[in-house]
Amino acid sequence: MPELRYNRLNNTWTIISKERAKRPHDYPIGWSKERGDINKCPFEPGKEHLTPSEVYAIREPGTPPNTPGWKVRVIPNKFPAVKPEEDFFRNSEDIYDRMGGFGYHEVIIDTPDHYKQLQDFSVGEIFLMLLAYRERMKQLYKDKNIYYVQIFKNHGKEAGKSLYHSHSQLIALPRIPKRIDTQINQTRKYYIEKERCLLCDEIKYERKHVERIIEENNRFLIYAPYASAFPFEMRILPTFHSHDFSSVTDEDLEDLAKTLQLAVRKLAQIFDNPPFNLILHTAPPLRNIPGKPDYFYDIDKFFHWYIEILPRIAIHAGFELGTEYFINPTPPEEAARYLREKN
Amino acid sequence: MPELRYNRLNNTWTIISKERAKRPHDYPIGWSKERGDINKCPFEPGKEHLTPSEVYAIREPGTPPNTPGWKVRVIPNKFPAVKPEEDFFRNSEDIYDRMGGFGYHEVIIDTPDHYKQLQDFSVGEIFLMLLAYRERMKQLYKDKNIYYVQIFKNHGKEAGKSLYHSHSQLIALPRIPKRIDTQINQTRKYYIEKERCLLCDEIKYERKHVERIIEENNRFLIYAPYASAFPFEMRILPTFHSHDFSSVTDEDLEDLAKTLQLAVRKLAQIFDNPPFNLILHTAPPLRNIPGKPDYFYDIDKFFHWYIEILPRIAIHAGFELGTEYFINPTPPEEAARYLREKN
């Protein structure tokens, strides 16, 4: 029988189809296998001149910027959604409101190898990718006009990736995006009522009941959220309370890298390398929010950072777009069972 | 230069890329051309026994239910997301909240012709489809446990359509979905402040400025919304104030059918029949909302029903899913210019 489940973190509901649970082979697979033309790829070592100048890189000692020798290379997006040189105006166009397109849009080329996709990365390579995430986040938060840095990775064409060569992206904005604002408000409400962190409570409950646990690896956990909006959705997070990804230690990043590698490899095995979006959610830095002086009060106590992996094996169609409710044909308990088995 | 635009109706922001506006040929096209196997299609006349029994049909006089002779045929979905026989419980599972999967999930087979897609429909055929929408909505609102009927049409595989034979769907829920709730709250706020309808104001402004107008047809208008979240997004709505689709007259449905035909044909011409979602937004019937006795007060004055067409020619990826902000690579003014030219 179908059941509606509340996603408290995002304040939305998911219809979980329990009766006719779709198993992995019920999903049509046939993702794009295009691997891009390496000769035309601007992300190859040796072709650094084809991209904007790097703003950060992890490279072999002694190699100069914008030359080969890098492991991870961060560059401004050549076709940015927002730009640092834009004026951050706020004004109106008669009845409509608008803001200037100020911000940063960067590409994190997370491997020099054209053909290596995330599930092929070693733990060390994933560690360097996460390190670049953290360092760019720290750096961009020094700009007092940046309120949020959204880091994400589109994996596969059907998940919105336009260049085959593996890369992540970040978009830094002068405003807290809607979904983060919702999560802050939802976790704050929970904290005010219970004086506890929502995700710490979820972790405790999930560990006790185990059916949605996928893997635990030292200080990190992978589980399938109760009201998953996407089939085979995974949440990866520290089992200790931590609100701010930019403050995680190198040691924790190493554990996180191991956990993330497991998650991605499990998914790749079940669906033959399906498209997915990897999204990092973390508390924003302290800033002035117009009209809300206490917006960040105690945020270190109630926000809990996490990474979500959203497989794009089912399409969000008219119903989801029209209602912002979701239909998930695979209960997370089932998804967890399949994912747990793989390693 | 990029610009952020506020979508007041949905309370979200869209980053509009004005500088490097993507023109139609900048989008990768190559939609699925699969037309399904007519011999295996359960929606063909003569195969009525393969589907659940019809709950409504527009058919030739004298033809009995569940036999050929229909123009539009409405059936319960064989694999429903929600079901009328489910108990509508509200309870919890320890820390989580859930509700029973009560509701209606129906398929509106809007043509007997396997190969006819919406852009091939005559005005009369679209009229019958819209008539079925209205009649099912009216009928389902007689069930006092139904709070909202979401009607939508997934056009093309990439827009989530699983069976080729043209059809629409409706999902009737015992709760007002999140997006409708947002729209009610947003239009109510506007009304309280200005004592005017938000969409009536938009219509007035857009008509005066014309750059986002695509077509006006008697009492209906097509325009590209100021903060369109999807490239080439279209909004179709009555130019007269009307909050409730289920109360539109046959005469208005005829005009609407003409307008909708124009919209769909214009889009099909520009992108060679691209995938899209068609979504109907309308005010819900008056019901008791827990804790909010005045929720519907004056809703007939501030809500304005409309149809949106959301082309799926760009993919909402990690950034959109992570932030609920959108990036639209084609300014609506540009989209309107291309769409206006086609007929």
Image (cartoon, coloured by chain):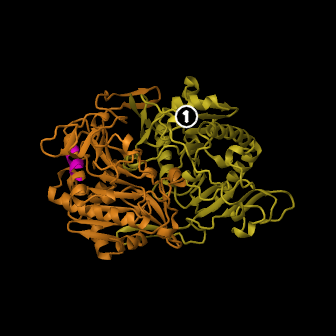
Chain colours: A yellow, B orange
* Furthest residue toward left: B62
Coordinates of residue A220 in the picture (x, y in percent): 66, 35
Residue B125 forms part of the magenta stretch? no
* Furthest residue toward right: A62
Give the crowd class for mark 1: few <14, some 14-19, many >=20 residues within 10 Å.
Answer: many
The stretch of residues the image draws in magenta is B130-136
Q: Is residue A78 above or below residue B139?
A: below
Locate residue B227: give its quadrant: bottom left
Magenta stretch, main secondary structure class: helix
Residue visible at 41% across and 62% down in the picture: B228
Coordinates of residue B72 in the picture (x, y in percent): 24, 47
* Viewer can see residue A22: yes
* Furthest residue toward front: B39
Per the image, label 1 sits on a secondary structure element best described as loop
Locate residue A38: give its quadrant: bottom right
Q: Is residue A253 above or below residue A42?
A: above
Q: Nearer the viewer, residue A104 or A90?
A: A104
Pointer 1 residue: A224
Coordinates of residue A194 in the picture (x, y in percent): 48, 33
Q: Nearer the viewer, residue A290 or A267?
A: A267
In this rendering, position of residue B142 left or right of residue A230: left
Coordinates of residue B324 in the picture (x, y in percent): 48, 53
Residue visible at 50% across and 46% down in the picture: A184
In this rendering, position of residue A28 left or right of residue B335: right
Q: Nearer the viewer, residue A61 or B338?
A: B338
Q: Is residue B17 above or below residue A262?
A: below
In this rendering, position of residue A253 left or right of residue B224: right
